[in-house]
Every structure is written in structure tokens, then in C-alpha cells.
Image (tube, helix red, strand yellow):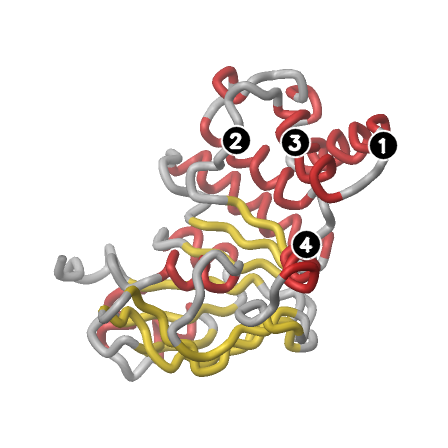
Amino acid sequence: MTGPGKVIIQVEGLTMGFGPMIIMERLDFEVRAGEIFVILGGSGSGKSTLLKHMIGLYRPLAGRILIDGADVTAAEGAKREDILRRIGVMYQMGALFGSMSLLQNVRLPLEVHTRLPPAAMDRIARARLQMVGLAEYSDFMPAEISGGMQKRAAIARAMVLDPKVLFLDEPSAGLDPITSAELDRLIRRLSSSLGMTMIVVTHELPSIFTIADRVIMLDKQTRSIVADGDPRMLRDNSEHPWVRRFLRRGETEDLPA
């Protein structure tokens, strides 16, 4: 990243929960254009729940989320659709349709959200597959390729509408260390070449230190954000012992379950 851009996401006073159960409360943070912004936390801290609030799948108990100045928590109808077209999402397991080729999977958002001619949709989808190194696999079915390649195809699909913000939920989940490292390099390269803002949920330390420009860490005990900043600075200098232990796993004793 060459430097911080304008604020593109604002989370203000966000309280998340289901019924009487509060998961996180009064969260406040900003994401700047062009950042790779990583959401961290222990098991059950609400990382993926926060991401699902940010993409409009869940409604908050309180607070609001602004994406490029528009309130995703309050918008309805056409306004909500317009906001959601500004984002792309790669879900944890890829969520590719098994009965469709990679090309068909990637072009699907174009079929739903645009009126482009079929040939134009194909060109765009093929270009996105080329960006993730899958140009030669466009006619393959998801079951015919590896898990890492499925994740790449899911990223291509998430980018096909040229979103301003790309959300990645546990992109390295289920991958071996070599494949995970390759995916990290792809994420970094796409961020650098496209200048795209990325919000990533992960708990993988190598990924955190490879891709993250900035992290926040959720703590389920206090139901709050306990750290915000460069992960290397937090690892070395945080005044919060749990933050240092989380970011030094392997160097010190394991975190408690």
C-alpha cells in the first residue's frame, strides 16, 4: 500500500447479537481506501459475524455501518442493492456452484446484475480468471480442481463487478501451508495492482503478517476491540498481554482454549 486513502468504511457504535445474547458492543472503527484490513480474535469472538454485518447479511442491534458514505444498515430496496453492488464477497468455503463451470460461476453476478451481451460477460469473466491464474481452467468444474484453485475462482467471482471493497472470510481455511502462502501472495498482488480495499477475516499468523496493513482484534470477554494497528507493532509493543500472546503463537505458550 502506498499510503492511507480516504475513509471508505465507517463502523459507528455497532452492537451485534442475537436476541438477548450480546456478542460485541459499541464497536467504532474506520477502514481506509486501499487497505488490507484484517479482523482478528479468538474462537467465538464474532469475527465472521462482524463481516456478515458489514456486508448487510445481519442487522445490528445498534449502530450503523457506512460503505462509501451510504448506510448499509438502514438502506432498503434499490438503495440497498446499489450499496451491495459496491462490494464483493468470498465466503469461507468458496461457495462455488458445483453444477457450473468456473467460467459460469464467475460470470453469474454479471448475469444477475447487468444487461451486458453474453460475449461481453464471457470476456470479463475470463479476464478475472486470468487475474487469479486460472485462465486455462475456465471450462473445469469445481470438483475437478484443488481447494486452493477453488478459492482463487471464488475471488475472481467476487471481483467480477469491479467492487470498491472485497470481503474475504477465512480465505486460507482448509489449505496446506504452501497453498495458503500462494493465496496470500495473490491477495497482496491484487491489492497492489488494483488498489482495492480488502477486509479479511483470518486467524492464520503467516497470513496476518504477509497481507495485513492494519488489524483490529476482537475480545469476547470485554465484547470490544482491544487492539487496532499494524500487526507487527502490536506483536512487539502492545500493552495488552493477550494481544501479544495471540500474535506470538509458536514463540510462547499456546493461548488457552
Q: Identify the residue shown where x is 67% and y is 33%.
A: 108
Residue type for callout 1: Ala
Cβ–Cβ under 8 Å for marks 1 and 2: no
Sequence-wise, the earlier of marks 4 and 2 is 4
Say which residue label 2 marks.
96
Sequence-wise, the earlier of marks 1 and 2 is 2
Residue type for callout 2: Leu
Q: Is residue 119 above or below residue 80?
A: above
**Element class at badge 2:** loop
Sequence-wise, the earlier of marks 1 and 3 is 1
Say which residue label 3 marks.
133
Residue closer to the observer: 145 or 242 = 145
Say which residue label 1 marks.
120
Task: Tell me the quarter of the image containing the N terminus.
Answer: bottom right
Sequence-wise, the earlier of marks 2 and 3 is 2
Quarter of the image where one finds residue 107: top right
Mark 3 Cα within 10 Å, few/some/many (few <14, many 20+)? some
Q: Identify the residue shown where x is 51% and y is 46%.
A: 184
Sequence-wise, the earlier of marks 4 and 1 is 4
**Element class at badge 3:** loop
Q: Is residue 140 above or below residue 229?
A: above
Please state which of the two labelled residues, at mark 2 or mark 3, is closer to the viewer.
2
Cβ–Cβ under 8 Å for marks 1 and 3: no
Q: CA distance from mark 4 to mark 3?
A: 24 Å
Say which residue label 4 marks.
85
Please state which of the two labelled residues, at mark 4 or mark 2, is closer to the viewer.
4
